Amino acid sequence: MVSITGAANALAQLGARLRAARLARDESMAVFAQRLGVSVPTLRAMERGADTVAIGYWANALWALDRISELDAVLVPAESLLDIARRAGQRSRQRASRRPT
């Protein structure tokens, strides 16, 4: 498997944050792994930032930490420069003037 340094670093940092969150909750690896529905070796791999861990396990971890909504920010469609220019070029709709009664 090809290893990309930036991705490996990001996974290592994510694993460190997962470990810190587990420790902040004062949970053992066995208890936390059971909550995630994974084995202790899988949790250990997650905390090391191994790139072989299935993303579903990461989603379970976010759910267990009550942070699943953070997954919504992953791969949000970016607005292109063309979209921004088109929006800027559109005239905003203005209200019709009032007629005197």
Image: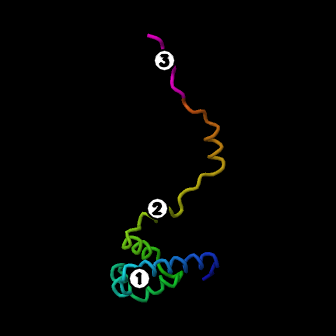
> Can you tell which quarter of the image residue 19 is in?
bottom left
Out of 28 and 11, give the one closest to the viewer: 28
Out of 74 and 67, give the one closest to the viewer: 67
In the image, residue 37 sits, relative to residue 68, either above or below, namely below
Secondary structure mostly taken by the magenta-highlighted segment of the chain: loop
Q: Which residue is mark 1?
A: 23
Out of 99 and 36, give the one closest to the viewer: 99
The earlier-in-sequence mark between 2 and 1 is 1
Question: Is disc 1 placed on a helix, strand or loop?
Answer: helix
Q: Nearer the viewer, mark 3 or mark 2?
A: 3
Tell me residue 42's x, y (percent).
Answer: 43, 85
Q: Is residue 74 magenta?
A: no
- Label at residue 72: 2
> Can you tell which quarter of the image residue 33 is in?
bottom left
Q: Nearer the viewer, mark 2 or mark 1?
A: 1
Q: Residues within 10 Å of mark 2 (few under 14, many from 20)?
A: few
Quadrant location of the N terminus?
A: bottom right
Q: Amino acid at mark 2?
A: Asp
Residue at the spot x=66%, y=50% of the render?
A: 81
Which stretch is magenta?
A: 94-101
Q: Amino acid at mark 1?
A: Leu
Q: Which residue is mark 3?
A: 98
Question: Is disc 2 placed on a helix, strand or loop?
Answer: helix
Task: Give the Cα distance between marks 1 and 3.
Answer: 64 Å
